[in-house]
Image (cartoon, rainbow, N blue to C red):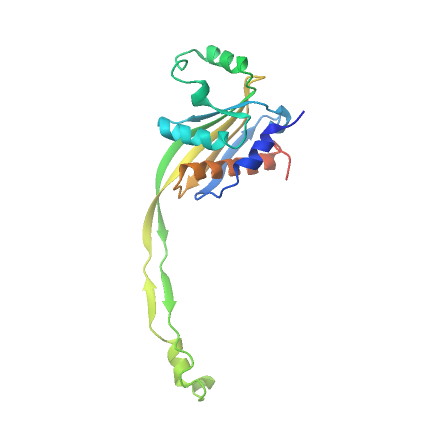
């Protein structure tokens, strides 16, 4: 049986991310790995209040492989008020066997100090052929003590986004992997989603949920 989730992982990370993203913590079901599930049809759910952001995030992941479906196409305004059991029945009737969710846990402001830089000018060569103190002419000596440009340090305020990613097996209706990532300097939602998934895959390879490269 083909293992489709690793196939998705190969395609979703073509572009480079603009954020600094790392795993904060993670957990996996010790009795099952993501690789063993052999998912064939997976629902992608971005749990954010803003509908535009939800669609952007879900589309970013779903476009990487045909086995993925966005939640806004399956669980829309016509069935959002259904009970949990009714929603699960819809997914099973539609032959979904896995779900990947992303949830914004928090967005915290951070202030970091960026140190200044010191750039000196060197006027070497002038009178360098004439011996002076320690074998250097005046021109070289002057170059060593030439005026320097100094860019002062400054404080920079950034936002750190904590995002929880979960992978569920619908066959057993249970969580099989979860991890929290921290993303800093995020400037593009789509690229940040890529960076989060990169960090997730790296961690899953590390803990054995996915086979090594």
Residue occupying the far right of the picture:
1
Name the spot of residue 50 as percent of width and height, x first. Answer: 35, 28
Instruction: Give above or below for 88 relative to 194.
Output: above
Instruction: Tell me which corner region of the image, top left, top right, bottom left or bottom right, holds residue 32.
Output: top right
Q: Residue at x 32, y 59 (%)?
A: 152
Residue positioned 49% across, 31% down in the render: 61
Task: Give the residue displayed 43% in from the left and 11% down from the top.
Answer: 83
Residue 41 at least partly seen:
yes
Q: Is residue 70 above or below residue 188?
A: above
In the rendered view, does 169 fall on the left or right side of 112?
A: right
Q: Is residue 152 left or right of residue 167?
A: left
Badge count: 0
Image quarter (top left, top right, bottom left or bottom right) of the C terminus: top right
Q: Please provide percent x and percent y for residue 87.
A: 47, 13
Q: Position of residue 210 (x, y in %)?
A: 61, 33
Q: Quadrant of residue 115?
A: bottom left
Q: Where the N terminus falls, by quadrant?
A: top right
On the question of residue 31 being in view, the answer is no
Pick whichever, 109 or 213, lies toward us: 213
Front one among 174 and 80: 80
Seen in the picture, residue 169 relative to 8 is either above or below; the reply is: above
**Which residue is painted at 64% across and 35% down in the image?**
211
The location of residue 65, given as percent across then percent down, is 54, 30
The extreme bottom residue here reads 130
Q: Nearer the viewer, residue 206 or 126?
A: 126
């Amino acid at each position: 049986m083909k293992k489709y989730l690793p196939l998705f992982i190969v395609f979703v990370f073509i572009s480079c991310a603009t954020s600094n993203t790392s795993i904060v913590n993670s957990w996996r079901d010790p009795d099952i790995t993501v690789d063993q599930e052999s998912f064939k049809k997976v629902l992608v759910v971005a749990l954010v209040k803003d509908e535009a952001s939800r669609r952007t995030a879900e589309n970013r992941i779903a476009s990487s492989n045909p086995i993925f479906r966005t939640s806004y196409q399956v669980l829309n305004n016509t069935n959002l008020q259904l009970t949990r059991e009714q929603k699960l029945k819809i997914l099973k009737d539609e032959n979904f066997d896995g779900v990947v969710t992303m949830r914004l846990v928090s967005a915290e402001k951070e202030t970091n100090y960026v140190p200044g830089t010191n750039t000196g000018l060197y006027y070497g060569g002038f009178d360098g052929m004439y011996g002076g103190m320690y074998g250097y002419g005046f021109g070289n000596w002057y170059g060593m003590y030439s005026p320097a440009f100094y860019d002062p340090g400054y404080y920079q305020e950034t936002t750190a986004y904590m995002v929880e990613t979960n992978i569920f097996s619908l066959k057993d209706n249970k969580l099989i992997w979860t991890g929290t990532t921290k993303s800093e300097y995020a400037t593009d939602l789509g690229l940040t989603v890529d960076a989060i998934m990169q960090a997730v895959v790296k961690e899953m390879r590390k803990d054995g949920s996915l086979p090594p490269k």
